[in-house]
Amino acid sequence: GVSIGLIIIFISCVIFSVFSATYYSINESAFSDYLQETQVHFEKLREASLEQMTVEQFEAQKKAYLETTVSDLVIGKFFTKLVIGFLMTPLVAIVLRKQTK
């Protein structure tokens, strides 16, 4: 159960990453829209963020996000989905194992 789930999660992440990279390559405005939404998000959270970090840290974090490339985005989403899948698969396997008894 768990090993098959982990294999399926890995394959799903690879397929998602390939489709995402293809989508951003074909539709270049989608990536620029993503960057604009990121900038709007940072401006909305500016006050709350500045209570927890300095202005320099906030600006450095904002600059890093705005300098994101398509490959950075796709690789980041790949690993995020992979980690979540690796954490969820054993939990689902345990729940399903207990339901069959």
Image (cartoon, rainbow, N blue to C red):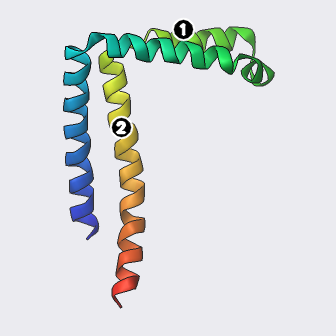
Left or right, 23 with reference to 54: left
Q: Nearer the viewer, residue 43 or 5?
A: 43
Residue 39 percent location from the top left of the image: 55, 12
The tag on residue 63 is 1
Q: Compared with residue 9, is residue 54 higher up or lower down, i.e. above or below? A: above
Q: Compared with residue 76, is residue 67 higher up or lower down, i.e. above or below? A: above
The tag on residue 79 is 2
For image coordinates 35% across by 20% down, the residue present is 72
For image coordinates 38% across by 67% down, the residue present is 92
Residue 96 percent location from the top left of the image: 36, 77
Left or right, 54 with reference to 58: right
Q: Secondary structure at mark 1?
A: helix
Left or right, 34 with reference to 60: left
Q: Could you tell me how far apart the alpha carbons at marks 1 and 2 are, in whole angstroms?
A: 22 Å
Residue 69 percent location from the top left of the image: 35, 13
The earlier-in-sequence mark between 1 and 2 is 1
Q: Secondary structure at mark 2?
A: helix
Q: Amino acid at mark 2?
A: Phe
For image coordinates 35% across by 71% down, the residue present is 93
Instruction: Say whether marks 1 and 2 touch (CB < 8 Å).
Output: no
Neighbour class for label 1 at 10 Å: few (<14), some, many (≥20)? few
Residue 14 percent location from the top left of the image: 21, 39
